[in-house]
Amino acid sequence: MKTTIVFIAAATLAGTAAAGTFFSEVESNNTIATANDIGIFDSPGGAMTLEGLIDQGDVDWFGFTLANTATLSFFAGFGTSGDGLMQIVAAGGDVIAFDDDSGIGLMPAIQIENLSAGTYYLSFSGFGDVDAGSVASDELADGLGHSENFAYKISVGFSVVPAPSALALMGLGGIVITRRRR
């Protein structure tokens, strides 16, 4: 009986990987309207890698949907000749996160906890396109203002925040398992 409960809990937490594991950007994806759709994140523990090229005056947009409240992490990687930046934008156009250099060297990294279910966009561009003031002004990256040219990869990781009722059920399962041992 204990094995069955543990297996059911593990299967519930594992889920299936959402949206795939690797995505290459496809031009033209220079606006929210033309963003590459990378899928729906609906299971805990999902991850994927985005790759692309930034040229002078270029910005790459990716759209995704969260089926549940989630924590997301975005980490960019590229050669030493680049200087990139990222924005996370809500479906209505509100810039909710920006980063320039929180990763290694000149690489951006963003982590957002408890992001509500909905549609969001990730922009990746070169230094000088927009700045941290874009969060207050909702200025979207448009590729103008930078002369960067480099290839990049972005690691996207997410974990779904369990609903309170799911946490209660997991807690009850733990109580049942604990009582059973006595």
Image (spheres, rainbow, N blue to C red):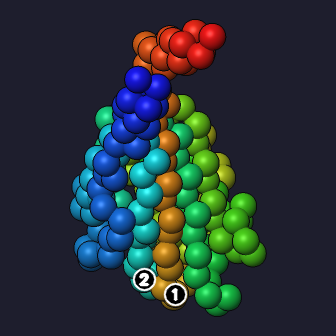
> Is 68 drawn above or below residue 129 in the view shown?
above
Residue at the disc numbered 2:
53
Quadrant hosting residue 101:
bottom right
The residue drawn where x is 31% and y is 48% is 16
Q: Nearer the viewer, residue 20 or 66?
A: 20
Residue 93 at x, y percent in the picture = 39, 42
Q: Measured from the top left, where is residue 132 in percent x and y?
A: 66, 52
Query: Which residue extends farthest right?
Result: 105
Give the SS element for disc 2. Answer: strand
Query: Which residue is pictured at 36% across the width and 65% down the height?
Result: 21
Dot 1: element: strand
From the viewer's perspective, tell me whether residue 38 is left or right of residue 172.
Answer: left
Q: Amino acid at mark 2?
A: Leu
Depth check, front residue: 72 or 151? 72
Task: Quote the CA–CA distance across marks 1 and 2.
Answer: 6 Å
Q: Is residue 63 above or below residue 76?
A: above
For the C terminus, the quadrant is top right
- Crowd rating for badge 1 (residues with CA inside 10 Å; few <14, some 14–19, many 20+): some
Residue 31 in the figure: left or right of residue 163:
left
| Residue at the spot 41% in from the left edge and 76% down from the top edge | 51
Work out whether mark 1 precedes mark 2 in sequence or the reverse, and give the earlier one.
Answer: 2
Mark 1 in CB contact with mark 2 (< 8 angstroms): yes
Residue neighbourhood size for the residue with mark 2, other residues' Cα within 10 Å, grouped as few (<14), some (14–19), many (≥20) = many
Q: Amino acid at mark 1?
A: Phe
Of 165 and 181, the residue lying toward us: 181
Q: Which residue is mark 1?
A: 150
Q: What residue is rendered at 46% in x and 26% in y? A: 2
Q: Quarter-wise, where is residue 7 in the image?
A: top left
Percent position of residue 119, x then y: 33, 41
Residue 90 visible, this angle: no
